[in-house]
Image (spheres, rainbow, N blue to C red):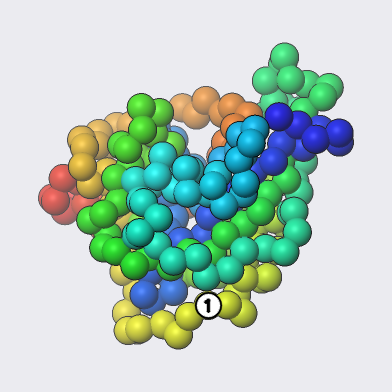
Amino acid sequence: MLDREGFRPNVGIILLNHRNQVFWGKRIRTHSWQFPQGGIKHGESPEQAMFRELHEEVGLLPDHVRIVARTRDWLRYEVPNHFIRKDARGHYKGQKQIWFLLQLMGRDTDMNLRASNHPEFDAWRWHDYWIPLETVIEFKRDVYQLALSELARFLPKPQGQQPNRYLRANMRGTHRLDDMHSDMHPDMEGSEGPDQVAGQDVTIIVNGTHR
């Protein structure tokens, strides 16, 4: 479903923990990291699409989160041609997004990266709210900056001081370390290219074991 300008309606999700750190997901079988996002289906409101994507990608239900705020207007980014499927070139231009700021009311263990048959992420971690823009693929950087800046004034008062530096693998399924080094296969549905994070020292948790 595209608008007249060739932009697909989409939602983006910034999920906070009680320290105002954000959920940062590693796209399955890639080195790419991003916020959860996904398309709005025909007949859905942005809020309905957000809750559907939240469950499909992160495994959370509406009762697990609280909506803190959302962006006022659509935020748009154009996708370079080489990231677009050949059959969509010429009429698909990019994404227009409504971004939601959510606060996790449940526990980390409520998350399930295998909640759908087509998982988006195979690992995740908590990251400081102001993610370095150089870790985001170039054509998404402006939208990430706009969304984070617009929603920052709604941040709840954080609890605690020490950041959680752990990288979490799928908490209810298996996770292969060699999957983290496979090639990327981008598509149109909110996953157009790599958002790479390099040079970070983290502890990996795979099925409860430190690696």
Front residue of 190/193: it is: 190
| Residue at the top extreme, as displayed | 87
For disc 1, the marked residue is 155
Horizontally, residue 206 falls left or right of residue 69, namely left
Q: Position of residue 129 (x, y in %)?
A: 50, 70
Compared across the picture, whether 117 is left or right of 12 comes to left
Report the quarter where the N terminus lies.
top right
Where's residue 37, x and y in %? 55, 45
**204 over 126 or under it: above or below:** above
Residue at 36% of width from left, 27% of height from top? 117
Q: How many marks?
A: 1
Where does the image place residue 143, in percent across and percent down from the top left?
Answer: 70, 55
Quadrant in the picture for residue 7: top right
Quarter of image, res 186: top right
| Vertical order, 186 against 74 (above or below) | above
Q: Residue at x 52, y 70 (%)?
A: 68
Q: Label 1 neighbourhood size at 10 Å, few (<14), some (14-19), many (20+)?
A: some
Tell me if I can see residue 13 in this picture: yes
Q: Quadrant of residue 194?
A: top right
Q: Nearer the viewer, residue 150 or 66?
A: 66
Residue at point 20%, 35% (across, down): 174
Q: Mark 1 belongs to which amino acid?
A: Leu
Image coordinates for residue 31, horizontal then vertical, percent: 45, 40
Q: Secondary structure at mark 1?
A: loop
Residue placed at 36% from the left, 51% from the top?
Answer: 61
Q: Residue furthest right?
A: 5
Q: Is residue 141 left or right of residue 183?
A: right
